[in-house]
Image (cartoon, rainbow, N blue to C red):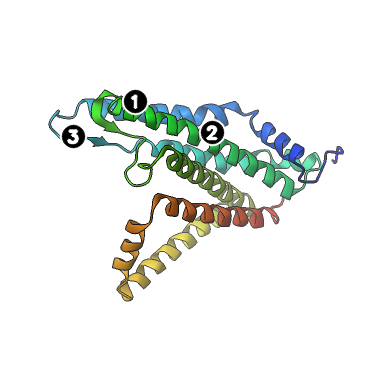
């Protein structure tokens, strides 16, 4: 039933959609940080029990937890409130754009906090344990601005990527989701086979090793745009 809600993609409408999502505070405001905190505690415990002479610096992978959490939040954000949004008279386009606005805003804030934690890690000598969790070599090892920008883009990418998975599941069910995953794996395998047959693995490795952090961020940003377009295309044909 149409209640007279605006159907255009005005800024005010998009902000209201983002605020509507934020009513689920557990998913958007607590889950990512709870996941990261748990990963941090685990890394501290593991690093603390390592032999003192094991290495000068301990690189850990706990930071990946917040990226996984962001993907999961994106997975449920596009589809959870979609029926209600459409019942209020919102178009699919407007609902999706409002969700993207939230993704961008959350990614910017999360990226900023991660950048602050990166600075604290550096100032405390790796939390007093020579532990490297937030200053990831090559990817987040540059200036604070480069680190924030890379985190921001990567988080936004995983959010919209998770949203696309959710839309695929809503449109085609479990079979479609499995096919979606299989298709991506097939593309990666085809690329690997092509690189093997053409003996270009060294060129691929050279490309990624010489790519600057800014260049990597640009590649991730372009991929995020592609994923947004894919999600929007899928949403247009989702039945409610």
Question: Which residue: 59% across, 37% down?
Answer: 105
**Is 217 placed left or right of 209 in the picture?**
right
Question: Which residue: 62% across, 38% down?
Answer: 102
On screen, residue 225 above or below 8: below
**Is 39 placed left or right of 55 in the picture?**
right
- Which residue in the structure is indicated by mark 1? 41
- Circle 2 sits in a helix, a strand or a loop, which is it? helix
Coordinates of residue 33 in the picture (x, y in percent): 47, 28
- Which residue in the structure is indicated by mark 2? 109
Residue 240 visible (yes or no):
no
**Is 220 placed left or right of 230 in the picture?**
left
The Cα atoms of the two marked residues, 2 and 1, are separated by: 22 Å
For label 2, the crowd category at 10 Å Cα-Cα, with few meaning under 14, some 14 to 19 and many 20 or more, is some
For label 1, the crowd category at 10 Å Cα-Cα, with few meaning under 14, some 14 to 19 and many 20 or more, is few
- Which residue in the structure is indicated by mark 3? 56
Quadrant of the rendering where the N terminus is positioned? top right
On screen, residue 169 above or below 15: below
Query: Residue 49 or 205: which is nearer the viewer?
Result: 205
Q: Which of the two discs, 2 and 1, sits closer to the camera?
A: 2
Coordinates of residue 140 in the picture (x, y in percent): 38, 42
Question: Which residue: 49% across, 33% down?
Answer: 112
């Amino acid at each position: 039933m149409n209640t007279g809600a605006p159907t255009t993609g005005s800024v005010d409408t998009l902000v209201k959609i983002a605020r509507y999502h934020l009513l689920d505070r557990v998913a958007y405001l607590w889950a990512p940080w709870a996941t990261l905190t748990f990963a941090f505690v685990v890394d501290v415990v593991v690093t603390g029990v390592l032999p003192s002479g094991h290495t000068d610096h301990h690189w850990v992978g706990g930071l990946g937890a917040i990226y996984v959490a962001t993907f999961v939040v994106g997975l449920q954000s596009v589809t959870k409130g979609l029926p209600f949004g459409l019942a209020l008279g919102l178009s699919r386009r407007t609902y999706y754009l409002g969700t993207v606005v939230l993704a961008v805003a959350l990614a910017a804030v999360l990226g900023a906090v991660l950048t602050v934690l990166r600075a604290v890690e550096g100032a405390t000598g790796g939390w007093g344990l020579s532990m490297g969790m937030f200053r990831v070599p090559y990817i987040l090892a540059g200036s604070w601005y480069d680190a924030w920008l890379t985190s921001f883009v990567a988080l936004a990418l995983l959010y919209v990527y998770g949203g696309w998975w959710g839309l695929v599941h809503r449109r085609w069910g479990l079979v479609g989701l499995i096919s979606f995953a299989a298709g991506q794996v097939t593309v990666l395998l085809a690329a690997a086979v092509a690189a093997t047959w053409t003996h270009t693995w060294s060129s691929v490795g050279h490309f990624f090793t010489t790519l600057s952090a800014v260049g990597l961020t640009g590649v991730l940003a372009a991929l995020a745009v592609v994923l947004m377009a894919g999600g929007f295309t899928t949403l247009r044909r989702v039945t409610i």
